[in-house]
Image (cartoon, coloured by chain):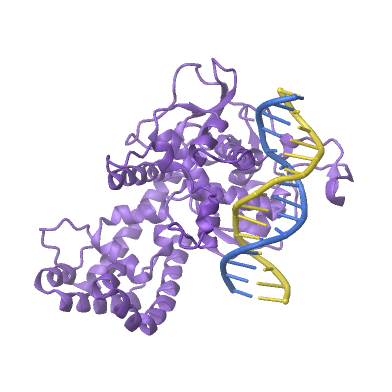
Chain colours: A purple, B blue, C yellow
Amino acid sequence: MATAAVMAAVPSSSPADAAEAVVMTEAVPSLPQRQQPVFVEGRGGKLRDHAYSRKQKSLGLLCSNFVALYNRDDVESIGLDDAARRLGVERRRIYDIVNVLESVGVSSFFLRLSWTGFLFFLARFDSDICFRFICEKILVRKAKNRYSWIGFGGVPMALRELKMSDDEDEDKMGDADGDTESEKLSQPVDNPSDNKPGAPRCRLRSDHRKEKSLGLLTQNFVKLFLTMEVDTISLDEAAKLLLGEGHAENSMRTKVRRLYDIANVLSSLNFIDKIQQADSRKPAFRWLGSAGKPKAENGVTIAVPPPGKTISNKRAFGTELTNIDINRSRLDSTIPKKAKLTQSGGEILKNCKLSVQKQLGQGSKGGFVYGPFHPAGARKQELDNGNKGHTDNVQNWESLAASFRPQYQNQALGDLFAHYMEAWKSWYSEFAQGSSMMQQHFGMPVINQFL
DNA sequence: CAATCCCGCCAGGTA
DNA sequence: TACCTGGCGGGATTG
């Protein structure tokens, strides 16, 4: 898969056409790009390509096409139906790709925060970090059927986040519990005893579903490379590590299937590549980090020359961002995309800072290490008061949330902030109704932690 | 024949 | 309740 020669089908529309259609409309006539097949009856009564080749339908190739189609400056919004139509696949396949891409962007933390909580983090922590949290995703869900394309610029940071999150887990676990890496990474066991009355690990079914999600599995798969001293790993080994011991053959097989899906997508992005283990001759995947080069160039999958056999391409964390953005394609290389993103990020931060400072007044006075968004009132309140400070704090944030409207040139970010505003509105109304009950159950300090 | 992974069913979630 | 989302495993294809 990793060295698949030349893609059989090239997106037939020009990049400019694609970008325009992506942004402008969902009603563009479809142009199934992957092939122009001769159809015969296939499985499930559906029509199938006569010269059927599953290589042409692979998830990796689809991902390459997806990236080739949408990884452009002027693409900010991706319609699920539009993507499916343009790529000539069912929506189901788009979900697969999108989930993996999104999970490589790591943190959906801010997407789940209330507007107030979001502002609080902007103020309390370094705004650059906050900005990265938002931007450094490949894409994020914007609404039903619609995603925002962010780009690859922040992938290294996202991977670092993944590693950090694992380190934090490690710290919390401590040394005494004797957990192994694999135990930490492994997803919960389908243990029938969980269903027993009074079982300690009773979980909601939706949680259970999330725990098995392709996105989480992707993150854990990547973590295997990031946190363990391995450069290569077979999918069998990965499945064992991720599942833990004592699993039925069936669930192991299912996990390996999913890992194949993930590996194909990550491989098409050149996060990993497929190799043959020298000793066992078994296929395995080697981590390239984001040092690899995506294969999609104008929709054509380029045969990537196999890297040196013994030289690891593994990157050290903390090193410079790689070419994944800049060298992504010849098309993109003519556009200073990364610089543009950085610049626009700077402008965003600048605007944001000005707006916040205007509304909060000046006054970061050292002491506690706040970011540039440090609100004057927040620190004072913390120092001066206990509960009163909390109350004022809440009120300040409420008024700020109600009035603060950063103006973003980047539509996707604007949309994100709109999302937070909506989230804040609904959250606040729920909170107002339920606050007394919450106070009863949890007490004020706990509630304030949500803020 | 083992490895690979496409395909679409269908359960759960959401508007 | 219609539609969206995505876990899941059967089984076709590939090597």
Quarter the C terminus of chain A occupies: bottom left
Q: Is residue A176 left or right of residue A206?
A: left
Residue A5: quarter of image:
top right
List x then y, in percent, for residue A179: 36, 40
Q: Is residue A274 left or right of residue A244?
A: right
Image point (56%, 23%), residue name? A275
Write the residue at 28% across / 57% down. Answer: A127
Q: Position of residue A21 (x, y in %)?
A: 65, 57
Which quadrant of the rendered structure holds the N terminus of chain A? top right
Q: Is residue A196 visible?
A: yes
Residue in the foreground of this view, choosing between A4 and A108: A108
Q: Quadrant of residue A359?
A: bottom left
Height in image: A365 above or below A284?
Answer: below
The one of A34 and A217 positioned closer to us in this rendering: A217
Q: Quadrant of residue A329?
A: top right
Q: Is residue A241 left or right of residue A253?
A: left
Q: How many marks?
A: 0
Of A63 and A322, nearer the camera is: A63
Indicate whether A157 appears above or below A199. above
Is residue A140 something that shows in the picture? Answer: no
x, y percent for residue A165: 35, 46
Q: Residue furthest right?
A: A40
Q: Residue furthest front?
A: A197
Residue at (46, 48) in percent of width and height: A105
Question: For this rendering, which residue is in front, A420 or A18?
Answer: A420
Q: Position of residue A158 (x, y in %)?
A: 40, 45
